[in-house]
Image (cartoon, rainbow, N blue to C red):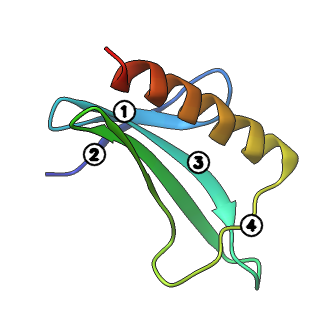
Amino acid sequence: MADEVDANHHGELHGSALGRKVWRINCGDVVNRERCLTVLVERNRVVLVGPPGETAVLTSGQLGQLRTALREAAEQAER
């Protein structure tokens, strides 16, 4: 099933997949190709998925988006 994804006012992408909230943060790799990081909550645990076999390179703005996503995911996992 495809993820439903929308942009919010902070610029990060989020949506839901199978009833779970999913955050997607754009990033690059070491040769400046577009990639993304995905954050989700699975069984009260936060899961961070990086680009397969790649290194994620984030700008300061993207790092702020990741920080927000991780904080929100942690709050959701604690419920």
Give the residue number, with chain letter if any, for mark 1: 15
Residue count near mark 2 (Cα–Cα under 10 Å), binned few <14, some 14–19, many ≥20: few
Distance, label 2 to label 1, CA atoms, is: 7 Å
Q: Whole-percent x and y of residue 45?
A: 33, 39
Distance, label 3 to label 1, CA atoms, is: 12 Å
Q: Is residue 12 left or right of residue 40?
A: right
Give the residue number, with chain letter if any, for mark 2: 3
Instruction: Reply above or below: 48 against 44.
Output: below
Give the residue number, with chain letter if any, for mark 3: 25
Can you tell which quarter of the image residue 61 is in?
top right
Distance, label 1 to label 4, CA atoms, is: 23 Å
Q: Is residue 43 left or right of residue 79?
A: left
Three-letter code, disc 4: Val
Three-letter code, disc 1: Gly
Evaluate if marks 4 and 2 touch, with contact meaning CB atoms under 8 Å apart. no
Give the residue number, with chain letter if any, for mark 4: 57
Mark sitting earlier along the chain (3/2):
2
What's the residue at 65%, 20% (across, down)? 9
* Quadrant showing the C terminus: top left
Q: Whole-percent x and y of residue 38?
A: 46, 51
